[in-house]
C-alpha cells in the first residue's frame, strides 16, 4: 500500500467531508432540501440502506461458507469478506440517519420500542449482525494480531505479543475452532437481515409494488449478487490478482453471476403474473415500472445481464473481474432504486366513482407539504403523482457517506494484519 493507497485515502476522505457538510446543511434546513415530499417519503437514502444491507449479508455468507460448506477456496479472502460485512452493516444503519431528518428521534426507538414494528426488529438484527461480523473478523485474525499486532496512526503497533511457534500454532487451532462455532450462527443472521429488511417493505398494506412473499427471496438473491462482487473488488485491491487466488475469484464470480440470473428469473416471474392479471393495483404498479420508470428498469436489467456475461467469460482476468463486479453492483443499485417510484406513485387514497354507467377509482390527492409558486402564479399543492429525482443534497450525502465507508474500510485494511 503505497502512493495509490494515499491518493485513494485523500479522495475518499474529501468525499466524506463533502457528505458531512451536506448532512449538516440538511439538518439546518430540514428535509425540504431533498426532493422527497409527503407523497414520496422514501427515496435515495433508503435505496442505499437496502443496498448496504445486501452487501453486508453477502460478505458474511462468503466468509461463513468456509466452515459450514467446507469451501476452502474462499479462506484466503475470509478476513476481507467478514470485515466488509461489518462495515456495510454499520453503513446501512448510518444511511438511515439522513432519511429520518431528526436523528435525535432515534432515542424514541430505545425509550418507546414497538415490538409490532418490523423496523425495530430490523435494527435489532442489523446490530447483532454487525457485532457478529466484528467478532468473526477478530477470531479469524487473532493469530496474526498476536504475531504482528495492529498498526494505529500516531500510536504505533499495539496488541502484539511475543509468541513462540508452538503458541502461534495453538492460536491458529483455537481461531479455527471458534470460527467453526460462529459460522452456523453468522450465516442465519446474514440471511435474516435481508429477509427482515424485505418484510419491512412487503408488509406495507398500501404499497402493491411490494406485495407478495417473493420480495424476501429476491432480496437474498440481490445480496448474493452484490456481496461477492464487492468482496472481489475489495480483495483485488488488497491482495491483487495473484495466481493462487484465481480459484477464489473464479468461485466468487460464479456465485455472483448465478445469483444475478436467479434474481432476474424471480423478478420476471413476478412481472409475468402481474401482466397476466391485466388489472388491479399490482398490475398498475407494473405499468408504472414499464412506462414511467422504463429507463431505470433498462439500466438494472442490462447491467445485470452484462455483468453475468462478463463474469461468465472473463472470470480469469483482472479486467473481467473488475468490470463484471462493477456492472453487477450498478445493476443492483438500480434494482434498489426502483423499489420506490412504483410504490409511492400509486396513491393509496382512492374513492370509488360511478359515472355514465361505468365505475372507476379516483385517486385522492395528497398534500405536498410545501407552498409552490407565487401569489400571482400559484401551483398545485395537492398531487396524485410525484416525479421524484434526488436533489443535489441527497446525492452529495449519499456519495459522501460512500466516501466515508470506503475510507474506513481502507484504513482498517491497512491497520489490521489481513495479509498472510
Image: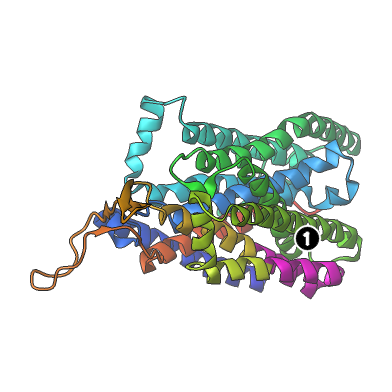
Asked if residue 413 can be seen in this view, the reply is no
Badge 1 element: helix
For image coordinates 90% across by 39% down, the residue present is 165
Whether residue 330 appears in magenta in the rendering, the answer is no
For image coordinates 69% across by 58% down, the residue present is 230
Q: Is residue 213 above or below residue 114?
A: below
Name the quadrant containing residue 3: bottom right
* Neighbours of disc 1 within 10 Å: few (<14), some (14-19), many (20+): many
Residue 166: percent from left, percent from top = 91, 34
Residue 277: percent from left, percent from top = 59, 52
Main SS, magenta region, reads helix
User: How many marks do you count on the picture?
Assistant: 1
For image coordinates 59% across by 42% down, the residue present is 212
Name the quadrant containing residue 35: bottom left
For image coordinates 86% across by 65% down, the residue present is 242
Q: Is residue 78 left or right of residue 359?
A: right
Residue wearing tag 1: 257
Write the start and end of the magenta stretch as one range: 304-329
Amino acid at each position: 500500500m503505497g502512493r495509490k493507497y494515499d491518493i485513494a485515502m485523500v479522495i475518499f476522505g474529501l468525499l466524506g467531508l463533502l457528505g458531512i457538510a451536506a448532512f449538516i446543511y440538511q439538518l439546518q434546513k430540514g428535509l425540504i432540501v431533498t426532493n422527497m415530499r409527503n407523497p414520496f417519503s422514501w427515496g435515495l437514502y433508503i435505496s442505499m440502506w437496502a443496498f448496504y444491507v445486501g452487501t453486508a449479508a453477502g460478505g458474511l455468507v462468503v466468509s461463513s461458507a468456509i466452515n459450514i460448506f467446507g469451501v476452502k477456496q474462499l479462506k484466503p479472502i475470509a478476513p476481507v469478506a467478514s470485515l466488509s460485512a461489518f462495515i456495510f452493516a454499520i453503513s446501512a444503519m448510518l444511511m438511515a440517519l439522513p432519511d429520518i431528518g431528526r436523528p435525535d428521534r432515534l432515542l424514541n426507538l430505545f425509550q418507546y420500542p414497538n415490538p409490532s414494528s418490523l423496523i425495530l426488529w430490523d435494527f435489532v438484527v442489523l446490530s447483532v449482525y454487525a457485532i457478529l461480523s466484528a467478532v468473526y473478523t477478530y477470531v479469524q485474525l487473532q493469530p496474526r494480531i498476536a504475531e504482528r499486532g495492529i498498526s494505529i496512526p500516531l500510536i504505533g503497533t499495539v496488541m502484539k505479543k511475543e509468541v513462540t511457534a508452538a503458541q502461534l500454532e495453538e492460536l491458529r487451532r483455537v481461531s479455527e475452532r471458534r470460527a467453526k462455532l460462529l459460522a452456523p450462527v453468522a450465516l442465519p443472521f446474514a440471511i435474516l437481515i435481508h429477509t427482515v429488511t424485505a418484510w419491512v417493505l412487503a408488509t406495507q398494506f398500501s404499497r402493491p409494488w411490494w406485495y407478495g412473499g417473493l420480495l424476501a427471496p429476491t432480496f437474498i438473491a440481490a445480496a448474493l449478487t452484490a456481496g461477492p462482487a464487492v468482496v472481489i473488488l475489495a480483495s483485488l485491491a488488497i491482495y491483487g490478482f495473484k495466481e493462487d487466488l484465481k480459484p477464489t475469484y473464479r468461485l466468487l464470480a460464479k456465485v455472483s453471476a448465478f445469483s444475478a440470473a436467479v434474481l432476474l428469473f424471480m423478478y420476471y416471474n413476478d412481472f409475468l403474473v402481474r401482466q397476466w392479471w391485466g388489472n388491479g393495483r399490482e398490475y398498475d404498479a407494473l405499468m408504472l415500472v414499464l412506462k414511467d420508470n422504463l429507463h431505470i428498469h433498462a439500466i438494472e436489467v442490462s447491467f445485470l445481464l452484462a455483468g453475468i456475461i462478463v463474469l461468465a467469460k472473463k472470470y480469469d482476468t483482472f479486467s473481467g473481474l473488475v468490470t463484471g463486479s462493477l456492472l453487477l453492483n450498478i445493476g443492483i443499485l438500480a434494482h434498489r432504486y426502483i423499489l420506490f417510484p412504483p410504490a409511492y406513485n400509486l396513491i393509496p387514497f382512492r374513492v370509488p366513482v360511478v359515472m355514465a354507467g361505468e365505475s372507476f377509482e379516483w385517486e385522492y390527492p395528497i398534500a405536498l407539504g410545501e407552498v409552490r409558486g407565487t401569489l400571482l402564479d400559484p401551483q398545485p399543492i395537492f398531487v396524485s403523482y410525484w416525479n421524484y429525482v434526488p436533489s443535489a443534497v441527497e446525492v452529495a450525502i449519499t456519495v459522501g457517506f460512500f466516501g466515508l465507508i470506503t475510507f474506513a474500510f481502507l484504513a482498517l485494511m491497512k491497520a489490521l494484519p489481513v495479509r498472510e
